[in-house]
Amino acid sequence: MRAQIFFITLAVDDLDRAVSFYRDGLGWPTEGVVGSEFHDEVTGADGTIAFVTLEDGLKLGLYERTNLAKDASLPLGHPSSAQFSLGIPATSREDVDAMLEQASRAGGTLTAPAHLRPFGVYSGYFTDPDGHLFEVAWDSNA
């Protein structure tokens, strides 16, 4: 298996709210909600999804939580922010602070204030409206 990921899908409770957060709040490019005409007869999942285009071709999928569970044939579980985090690179301490402020203004929740970590990384955390955890980080050693 190749060590490559070309999309990450986040389960969301409200697709329109998620699109608004990422597109309008963070300024990330998306065509909005697509695929509403598709329905998987095998799993029962709807195809309604939104993709955010990230740098280097990576896509971030926003898919309703119930449809993702159906699509993967898994029971609908309880969301947890502590399972993983997605890292957003920054170019400076000021950039970290500015991005965290932007996420907060967009409706995200700051969970840990930015500070210099013992290993030389200045970072802070926020969650999106669905509780997905992001770390905005600048490596002072680089």
Image (tube, helix red, strand yellow):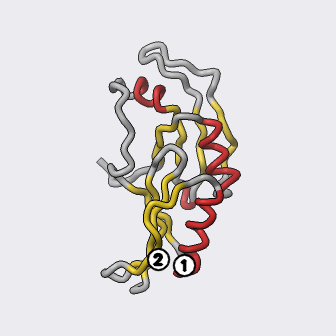
Crowding at mark 2 (Cα within 10 Å: few <14, some 14-19, many 20+): many
Choose the circle earlier in sequence order: 2 or 1.
1
Callout 1 secondary element: loop
47, 97: nearer the viewer: 97
Q: Name the residue beneath numbered marker 2.
A: 138
> For numbered disc 2, what is the local secondary structure?
strand
Q: Image height check: is 75 above or below 124?
A: above
Q: Which residue is mark 1?
A: 91
Could you tell whether 89 is left or right of 3 in the image? right
Residue at 47% in and 32% down: 65
Between marks 2 and 1, how big is the CA–CA gap?
Answer: 6 Å
Q: Are marks 2 and 1 in contact (CB under 8 Å)?
A: yes
| Residue 118, position as x, y percentages in the image | 31, 81
Query: Of all residues shown, which one is farthest toward the left?
Result: 1
Name the image quarter holding residue 142: bottom left
Q: Position of residue 103 (x, y in %)?
A: 59, 60
Q: Quadrant of residue 71?
A: top left
Residue 77's disc is none
Three-letter code for the amino acid on which mark 1 is drawn: Thr
Quick check: 70 left or right of 60?
Answer: left
Vertical order, 17 against 122 (above or below): above
Q: Is the residue 93 above or below the residue 12 in the image?
A: below
